[in-house]
Image (cartoon, grey):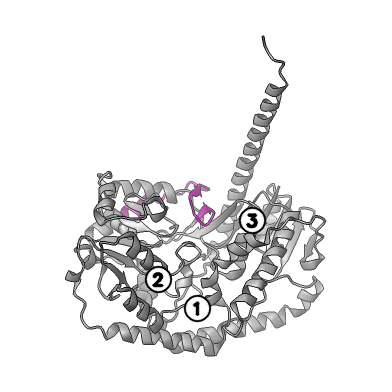
Amino acid sequence: MKILIMSGPEGSLADALLENGVSTLVCVTQGNLHLRSRAGSVASGRNIALPQQIALDVPAVRSLLMKAYPLVDRWVGNGQSMSATLETMLEYTSTLIQFIGNYLPRFAVLETGAPHHLFTYCLDAALRYLEVPIYYLYGNAFDGRCLAVRGNEKAEVVNVTDYSPQAVIDDYVEQVQRNATYIPADSTRSLSPFLHGWRPYAAWLHVREGLARRYVALRKGAPALAEGPGIRLRLPPVGLGQLLRILKGHSQYRTLMGSRGVFAPESIGPNDVVYVGHMVPEATSFPESPDYPGEIDVLIDLKNRFPDSKVFYREHPAIALYSEFGHIHLQGLHKNPAFYEQLERLGIGLVPSGLHISKIRERGCLFATKTGRVAVENSVLGIPTLLYGYPFYGCDLPLAFHVGSLPARLTADMVRARAVEVTDCAAAVKTHLVARFSGSIDNPGIGLGNDASARPRFEEGVVRLVRLLGVDAAMSAEAQWRQEAGREAGMAQPAQG
C-alpha cells in the first residue's frame, strides 16, 4: 500500500508507517519530494524516476490555482506580478501531478489543519486533480486534539481512538448557557499578551523568521546537494518594507474605526444580518471558505441575498493584534483603509470589535460567519447562523445553514422558519459535537503552540489512522471487484425462454 504524507522520508513516523502495512511512502515537504520503500531505499528530487507521462489538463489545474489569490497576497512579495506567481505555482503543481501520478497513493494524510500555505495548497490541488482521497489532521479548538477529516470540506470524520469529548462539550455548553459574555480560553490567550498588539514585535518576528530560514538553508546546503536538486515552490517572500507598510495600513484602519464614535446597538433590527468577521490576516480563512475567500465576498453576497435587510460587519477582537503565537501571523492581508472605504461604499454598518456578541444577540438579528465558533454558541442559545465556509464543527451543526443549501433570495424570517424544527437546542448541539469530536488523536501543535511531548502519541494515532483507512480502502476495492465480477457473470448468462 502506497500513501502520501507531508513529512520527510526519515524519522520515527516514516519508520512506524513502513512497519505497519505501508509499502511505499510518497513524501512531500516544503523543500523537496521523496520516495521511500519498505526496503529502505530513498530517492529524492529529480533523482526520482518518472516512467509515465500523466495526462495534464492545464486549464483545469490553473482554475484551481487561481482561487488561491488570498494566499498569494499573504505569502508572496509584491515585487513579483500575479501572472508570474501563478505560472510558478502551475509549474510546481504540474510537477507534483507527474510525481504523485507515477506513484499513485491510496490516500494522503496531511499533517496540517488546512492548506494555509501556498505549497500545501498546490499539493491539495494536485491530489484533487488526481482524485486521491485527502485526510487532514485538524486542530480542534474545543479540546486541543486532532480530528482526522476528509478533504477541506470536512464532511467526514474518522474515529481513530476511544477518546470521548463528552466532559469537555458538557462544560462548554454549560458555560455558554450560564455566561452571556463567555469568551473561549484560546481567544483570551491570544488577545491578552501586550506584545501581540505591538507593531515592532510583529516586525521582529518577521526578521527572526527570515534569519531562521537563511540559517537552515546554509546549514542544509551540502546535504541538499548530495540528495539532488530540490523540487519546491520558489517564490519571493514578503519583505520587511512591505510588511511595515501592511502594519501601517492595519494601524490606520484601527484609527478609522475608533473615529466613528459610540455605536448604538439599537440600530440593528430583527430583520438585519450581522456578519462576524475573522481573525487577521484574512487569508487564514481562505482555504476553509474557498468560494468566499474575503470579507467583502461575504458582505456582497449578504446584500444581494437579503435585499430587504441591513447588513452589518462586526470586526473581530483580534483586529487589535499585529501578531499571534501559535500561528504564522507574521505577514499578509491585514485590514487597511481601502477595506474601510469599501464598507462605506457598500453601505455596510460597522460594528466595533469592543461590542460583545451578547449585545448583538439581544437585538434578535440573524448572524453569518465563515467558520467561526459564534455559530456553535448561537446554536446552543437557539439562534440560527449562516455558514460561508467548511468549519471543523461541521456544516450539519443544528441551527446552522450553509449558504450552498439556501435560495439566492432570503429574508431573516425564512431562515428562522427553518430553525424552529430544532426543539432542545443545547441537547442537539451536545449530541452533534460529541459524535463529531469522538475518536480524535493527540495534537503535537497543529493550529496551536508546539507540544513536543505529544509527538509520540500523535504518531501512534497517525499509524492507527493509516491502518484503519487501509483496511477500509481494501474492503471497498474488494466490494467493487465483487460487484463488477457479478455484473460480468450476469452478462455471461444465456438468455432464458
Which residue occupies the extreme top position in the image? 497
Q: Work out whether residue 375 can be spotted.
A: yes
**Magenta span of residues:** 147-173
The 10 Å Cα crowd at callout 1, few under 14, some 14 to 19, many 20 or more, is: many
Q: Secondary structure at mark 1?
A: loop
Quadrant, the C terminus: top right
Given the image, on which type of amino acid does mark 3 rest?
Tyr
Q: Which residue is labeled 1 in the image?
A: 332
Residues at badges 3 and 2 in contact (C-beta under 8 Å)? no
Closer to us: mark 1 or mark 3? 3
Specify the label residue 373 is tagged with.
none
- Residue shown at 44%/77% (left/top)? 324
Q: CA distance from mark 2 to mark 1?
A: 16 Å
- Cα distance between the residues tagged 1 and 3: 28 Å
Alpha-carbon neighbours of circle 2 within 10 Å: few (<14), some, or many (≥20)? some
The label on residue 296 is 2
Between 485 and 463, the one lying in front of the other is 485
Q: Quadrant of residue 462?
A: bottom right
Q: Which residue is mark 3?
A: 129
Residue 483: horizontal and vertical position, in percent? 64, 30
Q: Amino acid at mark 1?
A: Gly
Q: Is residue 10 visible?
A: no
- Placement of 68 over or under 263, stated as above or below: above
Q: Position of residue 267 (x, y in %)?
A: 19, 70
